[in-house]
């Protein structure tokens, strides 16, 4: 099907699409995405014409671990959960993404299959670009290729750091760091109400981000609420005292 501005969208069988990512939204998120920020408006428009929109209802997957990796995605609207399979067969959350953030994999970038599953947390609009189209973008904009190399190197460095620190950090440190990371990517400054994370973040989701168990995460979150560092509800979390949370991220005590 096509949108009013002539773009082709990717429909899901049996799903009514609530919106179609209008052009101002698409160009806005491309302009602040990791690979495309700083490009001219004309360059962004050329990239936009190569992309396809995909609208997902809550809990619908963009792709699953093990499927062929053939595209990169940009979140235009909504929230997305990234999770990887564990030895037990369960999925452990590794990231929560919001507008402007990129994800996905391509065989041409060294990943022939997806290692993680990407699922919409809420109604979400994505922009998708395939391998050949992305190669054309890199030829037209060499800076994009350099950013891809830098990103791959940063991912490798983070993976090595995570392996080195995971066994020594406390649960409190890992939970605090997960909350701070989400605050940096998704937080909305509400003044006296703190940094608001308007996302349905379950204890299991946070446990995956913190590499812990839901029970341990619940104890840490309860303690942080009692001390006035955070507040939370069923579909939101608010960081009331970022400085105190940063201290906990650096010097957390308690169980490991």
Image: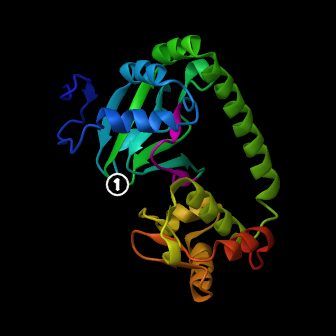
- Image quadrant in which you'd find residue 145: top right
Is 5 placed above or below 25 here?
above
Question: Residue 186 vs residue 227: left or right?
Answer: left
Q: Magenta residues, as a range?
A: 88-104
Judged from this view, the residue extending furthest toward the front is 41
- Quick check: is 38 in the magenta stretch? no
Which residue in the protein does label 1 denote?
122
x then y, percent, for residue 64 = 44, 39
* Quadrant assignment for the N terminus: top left
Is 24 placed above or below 237 here?
above
Mark 1, residues whose alpha carbon is within 10 Å: few (<14), some, or many (≥20)?
some
- Residue at 42% of width from left, 51% of height from top? 79
x then y, percent, for residue 118 = 45, 43
Q: Nearer the viewer, residue 5 or 150?
A: 5
- Residue at 60% of width from left, 65% of height from top? 179
- Image quadrant in which you'd find residue 166: bottom right
- Residue at 62% of width from left, 57% of height from top? 181
* Quadrant assignment for the C terminus: bottom right
Question: Residue 126 vs residue 112: left or right?
Answer: left
Q: In terms of secondary structure, where does tag 1 sit?
A: loop
x then y, percent, for residue 206 = 55, 64
Is 222 placed above or below 182 here?
below
Q: How many labels, in total?
A: 1
- Image quadrant in which you'd find residue 210: bottom right
Question: Residue 191 vs residue 20: left or right?
Answer: right
x then y, percent, for residue 188 = 49, 62
Q: Nearer the viewer, residue 58 or 32?
A: 32
Q: Is residue 125 visible?
A: yes
Q: Is residue 256 visible?
A: no
- Residue at 71% of width from left, 30% of height from top? 150
């Amino acid at each position: 099907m096509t949108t009013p501005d002539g773009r082709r969208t990717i429909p899901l069988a049996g799903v009514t699409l609530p919106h179609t990512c209008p052009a101002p939204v698409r160009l806005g998120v491309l302009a602040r995405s990791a690979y495309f920020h700083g490009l001219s408006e004309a360059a962004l428009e050329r990239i936009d014409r190569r992309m396809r929109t995909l609208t997902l209802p809550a809990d619908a997957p963009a792709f699953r671990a093990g499927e062929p990796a053939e595209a990169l995605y940009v979140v235009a609207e909504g929230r997305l959960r990234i999770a990887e399979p564990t030895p037990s067969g369960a999925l452990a959350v590794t990231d929560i993404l919001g507008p402007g953030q990129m994800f996905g994999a391509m065989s041409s970038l060294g990943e022939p299959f997806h290692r993680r599953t990407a699922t919409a947390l809420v109604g979400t609009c994505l922009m998708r670009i395939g391998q050949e189209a992305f190669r054309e973008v890199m030829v037209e904009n060499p800076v994009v290729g350099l950013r891809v190399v830098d990103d791959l190197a940063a991912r490798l460095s983070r993976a090595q750091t995570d392996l080195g620190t995971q066994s020594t950090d406390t649960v409190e440190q890992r939970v605090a760091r997960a909350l701070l990371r989400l605050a940096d990517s998704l937080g909305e400054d509400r003044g006296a109400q703190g940094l608001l994370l308007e996302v349905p973040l379950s204890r299991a989701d946070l446990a995956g981000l913190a590499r812990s168990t839901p029970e341990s995460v619940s104890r840490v979150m309860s303690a942080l609420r009692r001390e006035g560092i955070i507040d939370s509800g069923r579909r939101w979390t608010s960081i009331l005292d970022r400085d105190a949370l940063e201290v906990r991220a650096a010097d957390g005590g308690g169980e490991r």
